[in-house]
Image (spheres, helix red, strand yellow):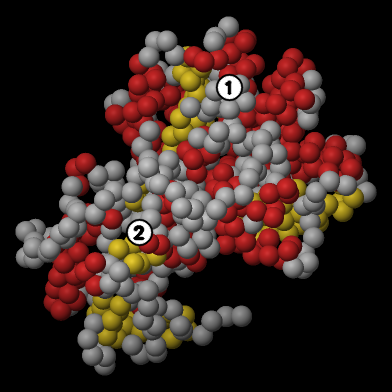
């Protein structure tokens, strides 16, 4: 149904716009820029910061453009002296008690507050606000919270509460002492935070950031006693380029591999190989549960943020989780067993670094149950952003590097492994293999578009081998909770479910490059990055996990068969319920 159109005037320009949209949206249509700080489309539209004020004829005072609806005949002014002065005063008041250590801030040159100060020509501040130092919350292995940089935009609150449904962040206290923090000023490590890092990606400043582990990697690379190897997740290659000025969704696999070699890693591996391995183990588990009457639905276990959410909020579904480790943890166990033996290296000397789009994987790597060889499967997890910082620190010209490829013996992956990076990708990869195993014949069409896209919850019924396989996909933890509630209430029944903690899946993970609100409010990062993932899948000669020759070799030489005793020792794990607000010392 077509929306009713109305006529308005913005800065003398007469335009036609849909009825009911906001002044900010109308200005976007007219290609007129209005500064914002707290606004984030569909996530945080509360008019709190007052940076977007405009003058509207017939109305007293200035109005917040991000929440004020247009009406027919409205006349709007976005650059009057009163508007400009109001924005400057507001910004100067925010800056007056802000921790302005820009040169040492991880968000320098990608800070929305810094950008606004430049755009509004802020020079010497007219106000000297009262400041007080609050303690840094750096006890989480994944996320650092710095309240001294917080501008109280509440974007992280909206993300945590309304999108992820966990609500571990909120405003506390009143007036000048207002602070965004977990309840009772606890650390993020003391509350049921899933470590997904989505709060970081929406923070306009440096108040939230990932725990930086680059120094640990530099130290390991300098240690001649260690055999330091690295693996990269599929979502990294379609986002890393953004850190170096490339368009969103650029595929930079070769540049990334070349950069890692120059940083000094002994071997550069593709986590996608282990994603194919994950599919072999997970599909074997699914088929076994279907045929033997096991616990259904089987729910994927690739997303550590989802796993922690399940442990805190839905422990009754822990038995439904696949026992498979996530791909990078599988790879870590493999590198410290099969690979170490092949290379004649002491497993204790094999140092595994994972480059991930995810902050929750930092937490995951510290799980005591993920140490199959007696050593941690993965030693350090770096986010896409951290890798970019290392590349810049090493003065590597990322955009001009020779073509390089992943190392063997585990550098070959299928398209099924690649699509793990997008929501629905794990499901589709599994279906490509499960359909052929259960059906006993090759698929005519291996693309399952029913499980693709950014709809919060997707359902599909696929006939394979005489079985109508009922599947569901959820991304974003609030959507996951809604899906689980339907199952609990008997409103839905499935054989197989994929859940990813981050909206859009790994391509939109908490460790991915941060795009400012004026980009992410009008462009769907999830879709743009996922597009590149599916392009890479289509370009690969092998697109099914069970056809990957490297995976076949691993089973022939080492594991025997999927689901074998050795496979369970190295590639599978278990999880247990967690208290939500335990009485523990954060140290």
Pointer 1: what residue? Answer: 374
Relative horizontal placement of residue 259, taking residue 114 as reference (left or right):
right
The secondary element bearing badge 2 is classed as helix
Q: Residues within 10 Å of mark 2 (few under 14, many from 20)?
A: some
Q: What is the x, y in percent for residue 21?
A: 44, 79
The residue depicted at 64 percent of the width and 57 percent of the height is 314
| Vertical arrangement, residue 173 with respect to residue 63, above or below | above
Q: Which mark is residue 582?
A: none
Residue 517 appears anywhere in the view? no
Q: Mark 2 near mark 1, Cβ–Cβ under 8 Å?
A: no
Sequence-wise first label, 2 or 1:
2
Image position of 460 (left or right of 92): right
Q: Position of residue 332 (x, y in %)?
A: 57, 26
In this figure, what is the number of numbered marks? 2
Side of 348 where 471 appears, left or right = right
Disc 2 marks which residue?
185
Examine the rendered structure and indicate whether residue 406 appears above or below residue 325. Answer: above
> Going by the image, does 37 lie left or right of 286?
left
The residue shown at (87%, 53%) is 468
**Viewer-side residue, 225 vs 451:** 225
**As displayed, is residue 350 above or below residue 106?**
above
Question: Where, by quadrant of the figure, is residue 393 drawn?
Answer: top left
Q: Position of residue 529 (x, y in %)?
A: 52, 47
Query: Residue 493's spot in the image, x, y percent?
Result: 79, 60
Q: Looking at the image, which residue is at 58% across and 6% down?
A: 344
């Amino acid at each position: 149904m077509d929306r009713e159109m109305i006529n308005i005037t913005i800065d003398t320009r007469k335009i036609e716009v849909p009825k009911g949209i906001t002044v900010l949206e109308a200005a976007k249509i007219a290609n007129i820029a209005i500064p914002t700080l707290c606004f984030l489309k569909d996530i945080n539209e509360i008019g709190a910061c007052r940076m977007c004020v405009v003058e509207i004829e017939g109305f007293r005072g200035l109005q917040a453009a991000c929440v004020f609806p247009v009406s027919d005949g409205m006349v709007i002014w976005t650059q009057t002296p009163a508007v400009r002065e109001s924005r400057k005063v507001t910004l100067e008041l925010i800056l007056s008690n802000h921790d302005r250590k820009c040169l040492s801030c991880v968000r320098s040159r990608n800070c929305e507050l810094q950008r606004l100060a430049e755009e509004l020509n802020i020079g010497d501040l007219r106000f000297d606000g009262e400041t007080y130092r609050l303690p840094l919350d750096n006890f989480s292995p994944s996320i650092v919270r710095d309240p001294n940089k917080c501008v109280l935009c509440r974007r992280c609150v909206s993300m945590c509460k309304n999108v992820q449904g966990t609500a571990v962040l909120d405003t506390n206290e009143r007036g000048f002492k207002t602070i965004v923090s977990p309840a009772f000023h606890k650390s993020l490590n003391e509350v049921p935070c899933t470590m997904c890092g989505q709060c970081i990606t929406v923070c306009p400043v440096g108040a939230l950031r990932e725990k930086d582990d680059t120094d640990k990697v530099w130290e390991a690379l300098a240690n001649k006693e260690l055999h330091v190897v690295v693996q990269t997740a599929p979502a990294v290659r379609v986002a890393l380029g953004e850190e170096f000025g490339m368009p969103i969704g650029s595929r930079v696999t070769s540049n990334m591999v070349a950069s890692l070699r120059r940083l000094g890693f002994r071997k550069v591996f593709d986590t996608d190989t282990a994603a194919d391995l994950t599919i072999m183990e997970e599909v074997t588990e699914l088929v076994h549960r279907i045929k033997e009457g096991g616990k259904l639905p089987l729910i994927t276990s690739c997303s550590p943020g989802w796993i922690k959410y399940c442990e805190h909020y839905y422990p009754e579904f822990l038995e439904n989780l696949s026992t498979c480790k996530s791909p990078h943890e599988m790879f870590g166990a493999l590198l410290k067993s099969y690979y170490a033996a092949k290379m004649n290296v002491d497993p204790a000397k094999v140092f595994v670094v994972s480059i991930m789009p995810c902050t929750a994987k930092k937490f995951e790597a510290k799980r005591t149950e993920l140490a199959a060889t007696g050593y941690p499967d993965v030693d350090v997890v770096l986010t896409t952003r951290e890798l970019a910082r290392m590349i810049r620190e090493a003065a590597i010209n990322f955009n001009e590097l020779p073509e390089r490829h992943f190392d063997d013996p585990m550098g070959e992956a299928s398209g099924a492994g690649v699509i793990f990076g997008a929501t629905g990708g794990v499901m589709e990869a599994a279906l490509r293999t499960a359909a052929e195993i259960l059906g006993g014949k090759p698929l005519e069409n291996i693309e399952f578009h029913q499980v693709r896209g950014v709809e919060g919850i997707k359902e599909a019924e696929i006939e394979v081998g005489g079985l109508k396989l009922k599947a569901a996909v959820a991304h974003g933890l609030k959507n996951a909770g809604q899906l689980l509630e339907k199952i609990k209430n008997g409103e839905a029944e499935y054989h197989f479910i994929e859940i990813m903690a981050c909206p859009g899946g790994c391509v939109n993970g908490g460790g991915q490059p941060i795009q400012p609100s004026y980009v992410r409010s009008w462009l769907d990062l999830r879709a743009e990055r996922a597009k590149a993932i599916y392009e890479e899948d289509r370009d690969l000669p092998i697109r099914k996990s069970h056809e990957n020759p490297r995976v076949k070799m691993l089973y022939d030489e080492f594991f025997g068969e999927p689901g074998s005793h050795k496979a369970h020792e190295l590639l599978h794990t278990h999880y247990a319920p967690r208290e939500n607000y335990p009485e523990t010392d954060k140290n």
